[in-house]
């Protein structure tokens, strides 16, 4: 496995400094530090299962480590993680990688790959005709990122009342169900945020992320970690969600076995 310990040490110093500049509430910064560690762990698992050339494997790990580099300065400057109200944190991260020189010791090709993946990791969908290696590295980061987002959301959905930000301000109303989200689940497609009507829809949408994962090992981890099941199971097993719930449980079981 690639040794990126010098980069991990650089990152630890960087975030310690950013944290020292926060005098009110370092909690959100700590969450992003923890998130970064877990995304890197997830990327290591994916890379460990795939047979990538060593420079690609290295790019995957570095892109995972630096994917949210923009988050810390974003929070310090704008007091939010909402890109729409501040900056695109992926592109901001690329600017910081250049400004800090944290990749200066790496080859030009590798710098290019890592910066491309950091800049693309938070796009809703990837551009169609990306250069193959950029596409691959970005997909590793996106899978690793999704796996950890699922962990965080599972933690929040386990207790009521729901945090409105986490549930995207959606109402917790069992009478509201989106036919589009249910249709997507029944047809093995990833549901769209724009179709969500309720927290139950959100639960179903998160389970459909299984169809958006790119690597067998991330699909397996998605299921083995148990978060997808925890999120899906509270859906009512009668009425409008029953069939989609049953179908998604079967999909998760089939992928996990
Ligand atoms: Fe991100």
Image (cartoon, rainbow, N blue to C red):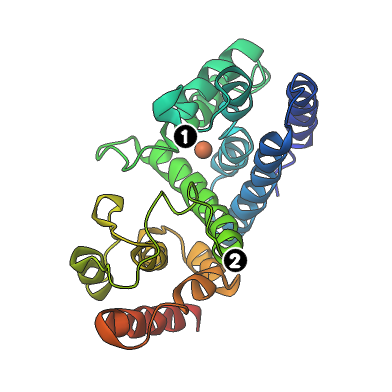
Please name whichever residue, 164 or 118, is drawn nearer the observer in this view of the structure: 164
Label 2 sits on a secondary structure element that is loop
Please name whichever residue, 194 or 95, is drawn nearer the observer in this view of the structure: 194
Q: In the drawing, what numbered circle is on residue 101?
A: none
Q: Which residue lies most toward the top here?
A: 99
Please name whichever residue, 251 or 82, is drawn nearer the observer in this view of the structure: 82
Q: Position of residue 168 (x, y in %)?
A: 41, 49
Position of residue 1 relative to residue 254, above or below, is: above
Position of residue 249 relative to residue 27, above or below, is: below
Measured Cα–Cα span from mark 2 to mark 1:
34 Å
| Number of numbered tags placed on the structure image | 2
* Residue identifier under label 1: 117
Asked if the residue at label 1 sits under 8 Å from ligand 1, the reply is: no
Q: Residue at x 59, y 55 (%)?
A: 152
Asked if the residue at label 2 sits under 8 Å from ligand 1, the reply is: no
* Residue identifier under label 2: 159
Q: Quadrant of residue 227?
A: bottom right
Q: Quadrant of residue 212?
A: bottom left
Q: Position of residue 142 (x, y in %)?
A: 47, 47
Q: Residue at x 65, y 42 (%)?
A: 36
Q: Position of residue 225 (x, y in %)?
A: 60, 70
Of callouts 2 and 1, the N-terminal one: 1
Apparent side of residue 146 relative to residue 27 in the rendered image (left or right): left
Mark 2 Cα within 10 Å, few/some/many (few <14, many 20+)? Answer: few
Q: Check whether the beta carbons of the residues at disc 2 and disc 1 lie within 8 A of each other.
A: no
Q: Quadrant of residue 85?
A: top left
Mark 1 Cα within 10 Å, few/some/many (few <14, many 20+)? Answer: many
Apparent side of residue 241 relative to residue 120 in the rendered image (left or right): left
Label 1 sits on a secondary structure element that is helix
Q: Given this view, does label 2 or label 1 mark the residue nearer the observer?
A: 2
Q: Residue at x 38, y 85 (%)?
A: 250
Q: Position of residue 67 (x, y in %)?
A: 56, 35
């Amino acid at each position: 496995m690639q040794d990126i310990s010098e980069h991990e040490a650089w990152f630890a110093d960087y975030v310690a400094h950013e944290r020292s500049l926060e005098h009110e509430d370092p909690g959100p910064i700590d969450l992003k530090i923890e998130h970064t560690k877990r995304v890197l762990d997830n990327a290591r698992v994916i890379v460990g299962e795939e047979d990538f050339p060593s420079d690609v494997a290295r790019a995957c790990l570095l892109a995972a480590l630096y994917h949210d580099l923009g988050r810390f300065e974003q929070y310090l400057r704008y007091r939010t993680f909402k890109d729409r109200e501040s900056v695109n944190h992926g592109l901001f991260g690329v600017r910081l990688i250049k400004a800090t020189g944290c990749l200066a010791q790496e080859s030009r090709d590798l710098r290019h790959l890592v910066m491309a993946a950091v800049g693309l990791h938070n796009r809703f969908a990837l551009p169609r005709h990306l250069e193959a290696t950029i596409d691959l590295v970005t997909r590793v980061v996106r899978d690793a990122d999704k796996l950890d987002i699922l962990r965080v959301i599972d933690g929040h959905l386990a207790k009521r009342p729901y945090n409105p930000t986490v549930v995207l301000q959606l109402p917790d109303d069992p009478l509201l169900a989106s036919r589009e989200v249910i249709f997507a689940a029944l047809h093995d497609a990833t549901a769209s945020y724009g179709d969500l009507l309720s927290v139950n829809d959100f639960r179903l949408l998160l389970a459909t992320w299984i169809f958006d994962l790119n690597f067998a090992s991330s699909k397996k981890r998605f299921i083995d970690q148990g978060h997808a099941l925890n999120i899906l199971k509270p859906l009512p097993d009668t009425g409008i969600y029953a069939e989609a719930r049953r179908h998604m449980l079967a999909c998760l079981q089939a992928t996990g076995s």
